[in-house]
Image: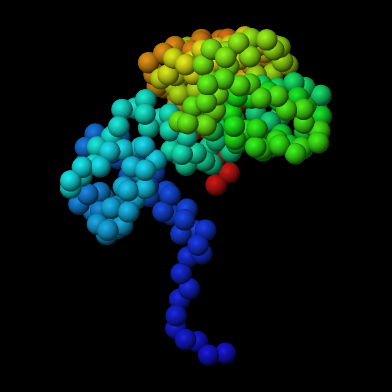
């Protein structure tokens, strides 16, 4: 066989993952520093200025950051952290690990309520074969996951549609949730410390609180990036949750502190690499 000497490049899937990982790092740098130049980003990322321009254009379209001549600045935290496209692309491995552990809480025959978080969206795909189940949700993409599943009774919790979250919020959604009583509620939120959970948007807090009140048991799904942080609005104390599922990137002392208030289940990410 003739060896042409050419080396095959990365697969399209690998190239796409590399691109997305770089864009996540760029977003994190911009958020950390507030304002940075294109040249600085190119040097930091080890790529060309043109590549950085393409990445910044993509991130600006997602609503993660703001472009200006020669540089880029971060949007307010409440904007980029709420953006679904941004949330779908960050800490994917951690969310998937947390979802696998949380799925063990769900048994056939249960009624479960799922919020519009990307952590719970990762969980939804693992529940398709756990039927029979009754699933209630305000998240459009979670509805898509279960549409057509014969053993899933699916109930949409409607309200005012939010393009940012691709879900239903507002007073009509709260009222729909308050009319229900379920076996298990699974949610995530923006931030938590050893004692309290938080979210940056009041409309979202009101829906999540109603959901938690509707559950005989409740579970919180959090990747390590959301832990040891706060946000504008208090959601509820950690002790109000029956279960908290976090990944193994959370500081061991904080895990110990959380266990003083509730059942904590650890999802292995780093140990399995």
Comparing 255 with 221, the one in front is 221
* Of the pair 141 and 273, the residue shown nearer to us: 141
Residue 205 image point, x, y percent: 49, 15
Considering every residue shown, the one lying at the far left of the view is: 70
Quadrant of the rendered image containing residue 242: top right
Q: Position of residue 186 (x, y in %)?
A: 62, 22
Above or below for 202 versus 187: above
Looking at the image, residue 64 sits to the left or right of residue 253; the answer is left
Q: How many marks?
A: 0
| Residue at left offset 81%, top offset 36% | 150
Residue at 24% in and 34% down: 34
Note whether 59 is above or below 103 in the view shown: below
User: Looking at the picture, how far across and down is residue 2, in whole percent?
Assistant: 53, 90
Please name the residue shown 23% across and 53% down the image.
Answer: 43
Colouring style: rainbow
Q: Judge by depth and name the residue closer to the eye, 207 or 47.
A: 207
Q: Is residue 224 visible?
A: no
Q: Residue at x 63, y 14 (%)?
A: 176
Q: Is 225 positioned to the left or the right of 145 in the image?
A: left
Residue 261 picture location, percent across and down = 56, 11
Along the horizontal axis of the image, is 30 left or right of 223?
left
């Amino acid at each position: 066989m003739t060896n042409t000497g050419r080396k095959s490049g990365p697969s399209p899937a690998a190239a796409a993952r590399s691109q997305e990982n770089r864009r996540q790092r760029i977003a994190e740098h911009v958020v950390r520093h507030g304002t940075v130049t294109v040249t600085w980003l190119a040097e930091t990322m080890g790529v060309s200025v043109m590549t950085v321009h393409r990445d910044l254009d993509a991130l600006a379209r997602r609503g993660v950051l703001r472009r200006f001549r020669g540089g880029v600045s971060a949007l307010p935290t409440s904007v980029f952290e709420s953006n679904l496209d941004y949330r779908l692309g960050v800490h994917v491995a951690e969310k998937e690990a947390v979802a696998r552990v949380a799925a063990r809480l769900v048994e056939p025959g249960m009624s479960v309520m799922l919020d519009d978080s990307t952590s719970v969206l990762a969980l939804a795909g693992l529940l398709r074969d756990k039927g029979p189940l009754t699933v209630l949700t305000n998240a459009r993409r979670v509805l898509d996951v279960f549409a057509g599943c014969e053993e899933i009774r699916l109930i949409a919790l409607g309200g005012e549609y939010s393009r940012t979250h691709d879900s239903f919020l507002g007073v009509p959604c709260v009222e729909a949730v308050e009319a229900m009583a379920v076996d298990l509620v699974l949610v995530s939120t923006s931030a938590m410390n050893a004692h309290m959970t938080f979210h940056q948007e009041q409309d979202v807090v009101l829906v999540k609180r109603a959901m938690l009140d509707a559950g005989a048991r409740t579970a919180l799904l959090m990747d390590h990036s959301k832990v040891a942080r706060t946000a504008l609005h208090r959601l509820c104390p950690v002790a109000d949750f029956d279960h908290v599922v976090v990944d193994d990137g959370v500081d061991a002392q904080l895990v110990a502190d959380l266990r003083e208030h509730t059942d904590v289940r650890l999802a292995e990410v780093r140990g399995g690499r």
